[in-house]
Amino acid sequence: MRTVTRPNRATIWNRFVASDPGLLRLMAGLRTVGAIALTLAVLGLMGSGPSRMVTGAMTAMVATFSIKEKHRGEQAVTLALGLPVAITAMSLGALLHGHTFASDACFIALIFAAVYCRRYGDRGTALGLIAFQVYFLSLFGGATYASLRELWATLAIGFACSALVRFAVIVESTERVLRRLRKAFRARVAQLVSVQIDLLDAGPDDVEKALDDVRLHTSRLHESAMMIQDRLDEGTADGATASLLQRRVAEAEIAAERLGVLILTARSAEPADTLALHLPDAPLPEPGDRLLKQDDTVETLHRDLEALQVLVAGPVSGERGAGVAQLRNRLLGYRDEENLPHAPAAVQDVFRGIGEATRAALGLRLALDGPQDESDDSPETKRSREELDAEDASIAAEEGEEEEPHPTGLDRPTTRAAVQVSVGSTLAIVGGELLSPQRWYWAVLTCWVVFLNTSSTGEILVKGYRRLLGTVLGVVAGVLLADVVGGHTWTAFALVLLFIFAMYFTAPVSYVLLSFFVTAMLGLLYTVLNTYSPAVLVLRIEETALGAICGMVAAIVVLPVQTDRRTDELLAAVLVRLGDVSGAAVEQLSGGIALDLLGKARELDVALDKLRASTKPLTHPITPWRARRQTARYIVALLETCAYHARSLAATAELLPYSRSVAADPRLKLAGRRISHNIDVLVARVAADAGDGVAETGASLAAMLELDTPDSPRHDRVTGRVLRHLQRLDEGVIGLARPLGVRISTPAKKPARSAAR
C-alpha cells in the first residue's frame, strides 16, 4: 500500500499550479487588483472624493480586463486606442445627461457597434467592451457636462495605472505563460498517475470513486494540453519548435490516458470499455482475479507508477538526477518484451503502458528542457533517444491552413448577436425605466452580459439563470456587508479589491460565483457613494431578472440559433475530424503516407471541446427534457471514447517511421474501410439529414484479419493492439448510429452445416 506523507510547500504549490494552469486566473486577478489599487492611491493623494475614486477604479478595471491580446506590443496599441474611445463614450454620456430619449438611442447604437466590432478579433472586442462599460459608468456615476474635465483626467489616470501595472509591475509574456503551462501540465500528469495508483488499490466499494477521480484528472490534463496548444504559435521561436512541443504534449497526454484504461482492464474480469472513463453512468466492469496471488507484481506496479510520477514531475540534477536516470532506464526497459514480468497478459499491458508513458515523459522533457546527460543511459534508453531524435529531425514547420468560408450578412455570428442584443437592450430599457427611472441600466447590463461568449439560445438561457442566482446570493451578502462596513470608506475599498480579485479568479470556474462577487461589490460601492439601501439591492435583483428575460426573449424571437441546430453543426464537425484522424492513421499504419497526424488529432479535440460546451444547456440539471439530457451525455461520452482511440491510433502511426516494434501492415486498410464508411453515413445524417444511409456491421475487425494469436510475430502483436483500437472505434461509431437515427445493417447469417456431415 502507499505511504501517506504530509504534503510539503512544494507539493501544495504544485497542486495549486495544476489547479490554475499557467497561473492565468491568479495573474489576471492580481493585475486587475493592482491597477485599481494604484488608481485609488493616486486619486487619494490628489484629494479626490468617493465618486471620482469609484469612477477611476472602475475605469482601471475595464482597461485591464478588456485587453486579451497575447503580445505586449498589441496590448499597448489596444490600450492606447482605448483611452480616446473611453473619453468619447464618457463625453456622450455626460452631454446626453437629462435627455432621456437621445441617451437611450445612443446607448442602443453603441451596444450594436460594440457587439458588431467583435468580428475584428481581440482588439475590436476590447474597444467595444470599453465603450459599453464606460458609457454604463457615466450612467452609474451620473456624469454631467460640468464634470467632464475631471472625468477625462480620471479616465486618463485609470488607463495610465492599468498600463503601468501591466507593463512594469505584473509583467506577462507569452513565453512566460507557456513555461508555466508546461509546469502545470507536468503537475497534472503526475496527479493523474497518482489517482491511477489509487484505482489500482481501490477495493470493490471504492472503485467508482477512484474512477471518478481518474475521469476528473484526465479531463484536467486535457484542459492543460489545450491551453498549451493555444499558446504554442506565439510562445515559441518557430513553427518547427511549436510542432515538436505539440507532438510531445499530445504523446504524453495519450500515454497517460491509456495507462488508466490498462489499469482498469488489469483489475477487471474482461477488457474495460473506455466509455467508463468518459461517462459517469457507464456500468463498471466486473472485478477480476488477474492481480490476485500476484503480490510481488502489484508491488512492482506500485513502485514503477510512483517512479513514473518522479520522472514527469520536472527537471532534476545532481545525485537525484542520477537516481532518476536509473528509474528511467528500468521503466523504458518495459518497451522490450523480454523485460516484462511473468504475469497475465492484461497486467503485462500495464507495464508496457508504463514503458510508453516513460518514453513520452522523456520526449516531453527533452523538448522542454533540452539535451541531458546521457552517460547513465541503458540500451533501451539510448534506443528511445534515437527514436525521439529521428522524429525531431523530421519535423518541419506546418503549412498554412486553408481558409474556411466565412458566413456573411445576418448569418455572421457577430451581426446576428448585435441585432439580438440591440433588440433585447431596447426591451430592457423600456422595462427597466418602468421599474426604476434612476437605475434601469442594470437591466441593460444583464442583457448585454448574457450574450457574451454564447452562441445558442440554450446557452443564453443557462447563463441568464446563473446570473440571476448569483445576483440573489450577492444581494444577501451585500446587505450584511453594508451593515458591517458602515461609513468606513477605505475598509469598503479594501473589500472591493478582494471581491474583484475573487471575480477574476473564479470567473472561468463558475459564472454564479462571478455574479455573486459582482453584486456584493456593488453593495459596497453604493455604501461608499452613500446611496445604499436594502431596497436598492432588491431592485438590483428585479432589474437583473428583467434583463435576463429580455435577453432570452430576443434570443428566442430575433434571428434565433436553436441549440439543436448549433449542436448538429458542431457534431458534424467532430465526426468529420474523427474521420480525418482515423483515416489518416490507418493510411500510414497500412503503409501509406499521412502528414501531421497529431495535429489532426488536436483539431479533433478542439472540435470536441466546442461540442461539449454547446451541449451544456441540454445536460444542465435544470433542463426539463430528461431524455434529451441522457442522450446528449451519451453521445458526447461516445465521441470522447472514439476520440481517445483515434488519438491512440495517430500516436502509434507517428511511431511507424522510427520504432523497431511498429511496422506497416497493408491488411489494416481493409479494417479501416468500414469505419470510414460508417462515419460518412453519420456525417450525411447530421449535416444533410440524409436518412437513406446504412451503417455497416459485421465480424470483429481482429477476426477479419485473423491476427493477434499467441504465435503471431511481434509486429503482428502490435497490429493486434492497433486492431483493438479500431474495433473499439468501430463499436463507438455504431453506438452513435442508434441515437442519431441511422439504420444499421444486419450481417447475413451463414447457412448451418448439416449435422450428418
Image (cartoon, helix red, strand yellow):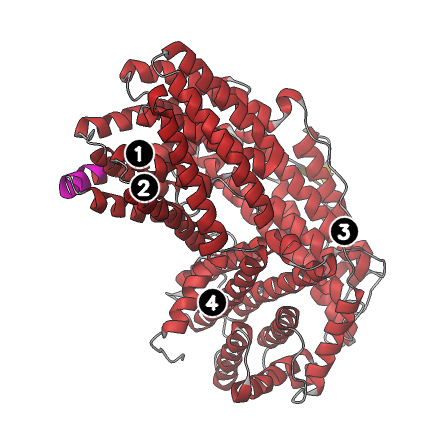
Q: Position of residue 302 (x, y in %)?
A: 48, 79
Q: Earlier in the sequence, mark 4 or mark 3?
A: 4
- Secondary structure under badge 3? helix
Residue placed under numbered mark 2 in the picture: 43
Q: Nearer the viewer, mark 3 or mark 2?
A: 2
Viewer-closest of 136 and 294? 136
Q: Are marks 1 and 2 in contact (CB under 8 Å)?
A: yes
- Residue at 84% from the left image edge and 57% from the top image edge: 593
- The three-letter amino acid code for the residue at tag 2 is Leu
- Secondary structure under badge 1? helix
- The three-letter amino acid code for the residue at tag 1 is Arg
Residue placed under numbered mark 4 in the picture: 191
Residue 334 visible, this orientation? yes
- Secondary structure under badge 2? helix
Q: Position of residue 53 (x, y in %)?
A: 30, 37
Q: Earlier in the sequence, mark 4 or mark 2?
A: 2
Q: Are marks 4 and 3 in contact (CB under 8 Å)?
A: no
Residue 481 magenta: yes
Q: CA distance from mark 4 to mark 1?
A: 48 Å
Q: Is residue 447 left or right of residue 320?
A: left
Q: CA distance from mark 1 to mark 2?
A: 8 Å
Where residue 252 sits, quadrant-wise, is bottom right
Q: Which label was assigned to residue 52? A: 1
Where are the magenta residues, as a range?
A: 478-486
Viewer-closest of 476 and 340? 476
Q: Are marks 1 and 3 in contact (CB under 8 Å)?
A: no
- 714 shown above or below 461: below
Number of residues whose C-alpha sits closer than 10 Å to that of mark 3, classed few (under 14), some (14–19) or many (20 or more): many
Q: CA distance from mark 4 to mark 3?
A: 33 Å
Residue placed under numbered mark 3 in the picture: 583
Q: CA distance from mark 1 to mark 3?
A: 63 Å
Q: Are marks 4 and 1 in contact (CB under 8 Å)?
A: no
